[in-house]
Image (cartoon, rainbow, N blue to C red):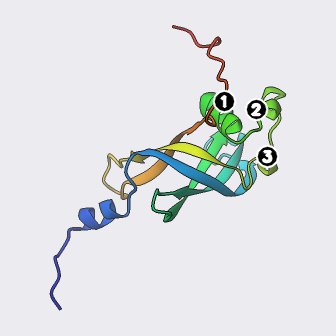
Amino acid sequence: MEFKPRTAKEIADSKLMAKGVYDFEIVDALETLSKSSSKPMIELKVKVIRPDGTARFLTDYLLEQRAEKLRNAALACGVLDRYEKGSLTSDDFRQKRGKLKLGVERDRTRTYPDKNVVVDYLPPAGAAVDYSSFTK
């Protein structure tokens, strides 16, 4: 058998999706506590879909401490009204679809392979976004 040998890094990199904007579907959500802070969070199992239809599954976490991402996820999933009331449940996110910004998290210690992460959730096309609360 003839083949082109690849390094472990080349193999790991081939498993990563490029940074960019992708369609998503939340296939599962679970209310739980953060292991690091013991504060409530929603753990999402996110299906990230490439333009060719192939997909990868990632785990993402929504926490009050990451307020912008939490709010943007609620907006992207059509539950901003529930966010504005100060109460979200895992049911609010299950089976929701939209667009997200995907990034690559590098392990500076080189102990673990690099991995894809959800950087943020994007508002639906045509959604009115209120920027009045943003400061300069």
Q: Is residue 122 left or right of residue 2?
A: right
> Which residue lies at the image location 64% right of the left edge and 23% below the top edge?
129
Q: Position of residue 109 (x, y in %)?
A: 32, 49
**Would residue 65 be visible to someone looking at this image?**
no
Q: Residues within 10 Å of mark 2 (few under 14, many from 20)?
A: some
Indicate the position of residue 90 as horizontal and vertical percent values: 77, 49
Q: Is residue 102 left or right of residue 63?
A: left
Q: Residue furthest top?
A: 136
Q: Amino acid at mark 3?
A: Asp
Report the residue marked by disc 3: 92
Q: Residues within 10 Å of mark 3 (few under 14, many from 20)?
A: some
Relative to 128, does residue 94 appear above or below in the rendering?
below
Residue 53 drawn above or below residue 69:
below
Mark 3 vs 1, N-terminal side: 3
Q: Residue at x 81, y 51 (%)?
A: 91
Q: Earlier in the sequence, mark 2 or mark 1?
A: 2
Q: Quadrant of residue 112?
A: bottom left
| Quarter of the image where one finds residue 45 | bottom right
Secondary structure category for the residue under label 2: helix
Report the amino acid beneath label 1. Ala
Between the C-alphas of marks 2 and 3, the distance is: 10 Å
Whole-percent x, y for residue 27 in the image: 68, 60
Q: Nearer the viewer, mark 2 or mark 1?
A: 1
Amino acid type assigned to the residue bearing label 2 in the image: Leu
Q: Earlier in the sequence, mark 2 or mark 3?
A: 2
* Point 44% across, 52% down: residue: 116
Q: Is residue 131 left or right of residue 42?
A: left
Taking depth in this image into account, of 111 and 54 the one nearest to the observer is 54
Question: On the picture, is 70 further left or further right than 57?
Answer: right
Residue identifier under label 2: 80
Q: Which residue is mark 1?
A: 127
